[in-house]
Amino acid sequence: MKKKADPRVSDTRRIKGSGNVFLDLGFDPAEAEIMALRAEVMIRVEQHLKAQGWTQAEAAKRLKITQPRVSRLTKGRWQDFSLDMLLTLAARAGLKPELRLAV
């Protein structure tokens, strides 16, 4: 017996995104902004750790967190970190976090 094709697979329509994947997924706009900020800071910290050539163990010592937390950070587990903690980790890594508000 032949399986019926999923119509979503053949749907070629395209919908323009908002630029914030969390907003596009249906999160509250304020929450979506915080989630996007967390993801951005996490990406920047992870890129910095790679650029420094630190092992996870060395990064853990410098960031003053455990190696398993460094692993979660480098795997992009943004839900495991608050924005406050990510900014703290960025500063500990030697980055200079700044906050700017736009109207």
Image (spheres, rainbow, N blue to C red):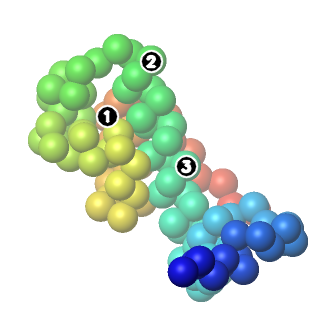
Asked if marks 2 and 3 touch (Cβ < 8 Å), the reply is: no
Q: Which residue is mark 3?
A: 40
Residue beneath the point at 15% across and 26% down: 57
- Which residue is pictured at 59% across the width and 77% down the height? 2
- Residue bearing the label numbered 2: 51
Instruction: Give me the residue at 32% from left, 59% from top.
Output: 81
Instruction: Identify the residue at the far front of this view.
Output: 1
From the viewer's perspective, is the residue at label 2 or at label 1 nearer? Answer: 2
Q: Quadrant of residue 48?
A: top left
Please state the horizontal and vertical placement of residue 61, each as a whole percent of the image: 15, 29
Mark 1 or 3, closer to the camera: 3
In the rendered structure, which amino acid carries the disc numbered 2?
Ala
**3D distance between C-alphas at marks 2 and 1:** 15 Å
- Disc 2 crowd rating (10 Å Cα; few below 14, some 14-19, many 20+) is few
Q: Position of residue 82 (x, y in %)?
A: 35, 62
Q: Would residue 30 be seen by someone viewing this image from the given angle?
A: no
- Give the residue type that dot 1 points to: Arg
Query: Which image quadrant: the N terminus?
Result: bottom right
Which label sits on residue 92? 1
Between 101 and 74, the residue placed more toward the observer is: 74
Tell which of 17 and 91 is nearer to you.
17
Question: Which residue shows up at 28% across the image and 18% down it?
Answer: 54
Q: Work out whether mark 2 precedes mark 3 in sequence or the reverse, and give the earlier one.
A: 3
Q: Name the secondary structure under disc 1.
A: helix
